[in-house]
Image (spheres, grey):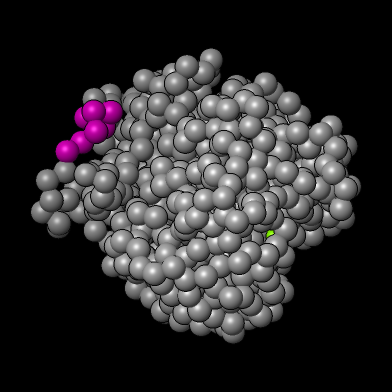
Amino acid sequence: MNKSISRRQFLATTAATGAFVSLHPFSAMAATNQAHLRILSTTDLHVHVHPYDYYADKPIDTVGLSRTAAIIEEVRAESTNSILVDNGDFLQGNPMGDYIAYERGMADGDMHPVMQAMNVLGYDCGTLGNHEFNYGVDFMAKVVQGADFPIVSANFVKTLGASAGADDTFLKPYTILEREITDGSGETHMIKIGLIGFLPPQIMNWDKRHLEGKFNARDILQAAKAWVPEMKEAGADIIVALSHSGISSAPETEGMGNAALYLAGVDGIDALVTGHSHLVFPSEAFADIDGIDLTAGTLQGKPATMGGFWGSHMGLIDLMLERDGDEWRVVTSVSSTRPISERVDRKNLPLVADVQKVLDATQAEHDATLEYIRRAVGMTEAPLHSYFALVADDPSVQIVSQAQTWYIEQMMQGSEWEGIPILSAAAPFKAGGRGGAEYYTDVAVGPVAIKNVSDLYLYPNTVRAVLINGAQVKGWLERSASIFNQITAGEQDQVLLNPEMPSYNFDVMDGVTYLIDLTQPPKFNRGGDVINAGANRIVNLQFNGAPIDPDGMFVVATNNYRAGGGGNFPGTDGTTIFEGPDTNRDVIVRYIVEKGTINPQADANWGFAPVADTTVIFETGPAGAGYADSVEGVNIEPAGDGADGFALFRITL
Ligand code: MN
Ligand code: MG
């Protein structure tokens, strides 16, 4: 298929729509021997075709290829020459992806909705991301078969060769598109556009269960240095790298996952579409990094873009090409991104409307996904509620820790940290507060639906593991325990919770046992600064039934917010050993789907240290009354009505 957009077609389109189309300066100024080529891109779509949050079961304006498509069509209409590429992570990452993988399946010849949507838009090329392996290689291969365009990957291999150029790649490492291109005087010429794709070699760890012993991954830079010269020999005029790999200033190391900055330095690569880290390039997120020019939008002088995630942005690279004999080369460039929504007054407002044909192409799967998220995918043997999450070990936090521990155990297998005890830190997110008296998780014994999982895990955090010692475990818990007011022994009905402290900074740690001595002052303030250095609220901290060794090492499963310093917890500075590609929410869904039946019975591994003749009062949702008697390890009784619809409860310490 030899696609091209000639100037005649372009003018005809413009006339037909009657739209006023202003030419990009490159198109307007292109000389006879010059041509303007636009590279339109999406990255990290993660099955977000419709503008819908399936976890919350409601429309949302920040995601959806149906919206990005409006920008794609608009930019195409104003372009003399353009190609559209996707940068990977397309088939997993929301409940529509799970629905296809876990429920409908991919029989031979089945189309995946994200591929149907991409076909409708006429993509020119795509590549694989790390998430393409989450459901196994057979599944990915069937999805890829449905593409009306080439999908390339230079470093996912069936077998490694003696050198990268001898690798037996699973897909074609690259493709060379022969396109007609219209120059500044309206003449058409042939151009050969080479496209090559790369993914993080970390897939071998992240999806070990699908890949180990059967497939392999080559270092990104080794693969580039082997295949790019071959593309040149095959006549590629320009070469675009589809880098499902982020931009990092970390020093170059073999096997690095975020290699785009160094990939840009490979001779022969003219432009880079980047992704994987779900950021926007150019943007201030990349300020002050050597080798990056944010004004020019370049990495080591090569134009690059990163279009956010879930369809949030379209990435755009404008190239001014110049013809020299039969060959084309890049003379100048502009890199940018175009968002589908904007944030105004703390609200997300859409900037574009849906492209109907994209919605239509996937409407059946969208409807089936809605049914899927509303129906049971597993069973729970214990009620999943969060009414007492701040005062006792709690099932809504327990299930998160069970899933996190289950996942990190798999990720540590075969790593240098295998065998180190694994703990899990998790905080209640939906626990009243400013959310109000009904803002609690409350799922009865019985079926659990996907949309319940958003109740358990509100944020799209990703899983992390940190390596810390026993002293840091205690410090972490002291930080959490600062949510409580200091209690005076012998006094009654003292207010337990400090309302300034948000519940999301109350990490409960699973895998150890401990008590909290409320008569001690808090060690930390709201911001995580030490205010009482000598305070020790955490007592009887034990691992395996013995006092914890301050020097003993532990792997702690957590999220990117906490591991990245959110809440300013002790032990989170430079201790990250594992950056998971999966969201905590996806891990919980996978855990529930794989286990079928879960039993998130809290194990009362933490509680308050006894204080004679002392009671405290706290407020929670009135619907918690039905569970008060069943909370283990703490004596809770109703204590009347609170303000704003909350109910008061009393704990005898
Ligand atoms: Mn991604
Ligand atoms: Mg527990």
Q: Nearer the viewer, residue 578 or 601?
A: 601
User: In the rendered structure, which segment of residues is drawn in magenta?
Assistant: 22-28
Left or right: where 419 falls relative to 533: right
Is 452 located above or below residue 263 in the figure?
below
Would you say residue 242 sits in the magenta stretch?
no
Q: Say which residue appears at 53% left-offset and 15% top-offset.
A: 290
- Residue 341 seen by the camera: yes
Left or right: where 652 falls relative to 96: right
Quadrant for ligand 2 reads bottom right
Q: Say which residue appears at 76% left-offset and 52% top-offset.
A: 513
Give how far across and how far down residue 271 sits, in percent. Answer: 49, 31
Q: Say which residue appears at 32% left-offset and 41% top-offset.
A: 338
Is 356 located above or below residue 474 in the figure?
below
Q: Say which residue appears at 69% left-offset and 74% top-offset.
A: 599
Q: Nearer the viewer, residue 213 or 82?
A: 213
Q: Quadrant of the C terminus?
A: bottom right
Is 431 located above or below residue 159 in the figure?
below
Q: Nearer the viewer, residue 121 or 550?
A: 550
Give how far across and how far down residue 495 sits, in percent. Answer: 45, 51
Give how far across and how far down residue 111 sits, in percent. Answer: 53, 73
Count the marks: 0
Give how far across and how far down residue 483 sits, in percent. Answer: 52, 44
- Residue 175 seen by the camera: no
Q: Quadrant of residue 35?
A: top left
Left or right: where 86 falls relative to 221: left
Is 487 located above or below residue 214 in the figure?
above
Would you say residue 25 sits in the magenta stretch?
yes
Left or right: where 395 falls relative to 353: right
